Image (cartoon, rainbow, N blue to C red):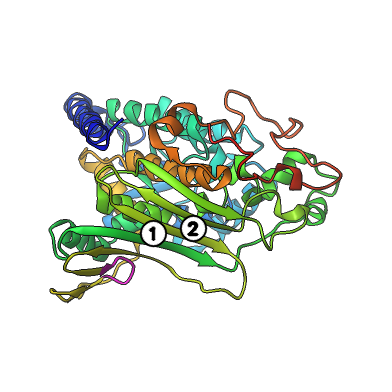
Amino acid sequence: MTRDNQASRRDFLKSTAVAAAGASLAGGLSIARSAHAQGSDVLKACLVGCGGRGQGAIRDCLDAAATTGDKVKVVAVADAFEDKAQGAAERLKGEEKYKDSVDLGDRVFGGLDSYKKAIDAGVDLVVTAAAPGFRPVHYRYAVERGKHVFMEKPCCVDAPGFRSLMETNKMADDKNLKVVVGLQRRHDPKLREAVAKVQEGAIGDLTYLRAYWNGGGVWVRDRAGLERQLGRTPTEMEYQVNNWYYFVWLSGDHICEQHVHNLDMCNWVMNGPPVEANGMGGRQVRKGPEVGHIYDHHFIEFTYANGIKMYSQCRHIPNTWSPVTQYAHGTKGMADLERPSIEGETNWRYRGEGVNPYKEEHVHLLKAIRSGEKLNDGWFGATSSFTAVFGRMATYSGQVVKWDDAVAKGPNEYPHGTELAFDTQPPIVPQDGSYEHAVAMPGVYKAY
């Protein structure tokens, strides 16, 4: 398929999606406006996934409600591990500023099916921040039951998950449900202004983009710590879900879990995802069973439909150059899209007020629920999440990967269609106590 044909196909898909969304907005307005607990002015919310980011997200939601004047009450929490759900519940109930916004009763749920219990607890809004591999399943369940959704990024870890997200996005639009994704840069006024200036031509014609998430790495949760937490030997599924960052079926690799933010910014500038990727990566310092089988560095050259390249780096290696940012380059200058500024024929720096974008995304969500205004971040949440998956497929395989083929034929990483329990065997299991056998080998791994 030529680039012109690919661009035409994307334009067609975009126009039909917009038309469908407009029709659903006209036909579904009453659903959103009656979604506050059977006519009540209180919006009942639940939290699914009670780790640090989940607890942060539900607090951001409550803080946003204090700003917008909405009444939000947290009525259920759920986590794969019941003690984490209980801990989150106690912390929320113990905070003075949330004393009138938390009414959990006995609606504190644990287990891999606990998301269903929380979503079915009479809520209007689901805040979901469990491990990313679960995201398509949790999102689908919430939308099927007519709930508004805030979901953390990334939204998928493989091609079947991406296809599921896109189907659920259409369902959410048909029901006029509001969806926000934790790609908070999209809700930050300084970055909105910067992207708008680039798209309006402030740096001339775009020539290329650069994206970075380099750092020293993140937390590790070992098997011994979980054994102390549970008071017994954990199952393999319990261990992997607890240490989820290091298993592709749960995190998508760090290119998905972190670098998705920078890739999303570039897609935002380009009004869509790339069509081709090639890259390289590997596992140089990650050693031992506690770090699973993900890589510690990736480099990808992405190509968009118009031929523009985006060069992407992400790395987890201590004591190395560690930028987290993205840039757009054009014929008349360069835009810094993290500390918003432009240098070139036109010089500009953002001078407006700063906001907390983690709260602001919830402000936008609550306002849309109240007004009935269309809001569905799920579309770019899905495509940017899959851009990260797409890049991983290129680095793992060492081959040139095409977007349409990746979407249609990319392999399952998450066990889709399986009802998981803690005694289920995970997709990856250790051999002689190690996961090294599962580390993708370029030239051997098949992207599709």
**Most common secondary structure along the magenta stretch:** loop
Question: Which segment is the magenta one?
Answer: 335-340
Q: Which sits in the foreground, 348 or 184?
A: 348
Residue 160 in picture, x, y percent from top left: 50, 29
Residue 53 in picture, x, y percent from top left: 52, 55
Q: Residue at x 30, y 65 (%)?
A: 337
Name the amino acid, label 2. Answer: Gly
Residue 77: within the magenta?
no
Mark 2 residue crowding within 10 angstroms, few (<14) / some (14–19) / many (20+): some
Name the amino acid, label 1. Answer: Tyr
Left/right of residue 100 with respect to residue 228 in the rendered view = left
Q: Residue at x 41, y 53 (%)?
A: 301
Mark 1 residue crowding within 10 angstroms, few (<14) / some (14–19) / many (20+): many
User: Relative to residue 158, is residue 408 depicted above or below?
Assistant: above
**Residue pointed to by mark 1:** 358
Residue 195 visible in the picture = yes
Q: Is there CB contact under 8 Å for labels 1 and 2?
A: yes
Q: Secondary structure at mark 1?
A: helix
Q: Secondary structure at mark 2?
A: helix
User: Relative to residue 72, is residue 422 depicted above or below?
Assistant: above
- Is tag 1's residue or tag 2's residue first in the polypeptide sequence? 2
Using the rendered view, name the quadrant where residue 43 is placed.
top left
User: Relative to residue 332, is residue 236 depicted above or below?
Assistant: above
**Residue pointed to by mark 2:** 56
Q: Residue at x 31, y 46 (%)?
A: 304
Tell me the distance, in whole angstroms, between the alpha carbons under discs 1 and 2.
9 Å
Residue 66 visible in the picture = no
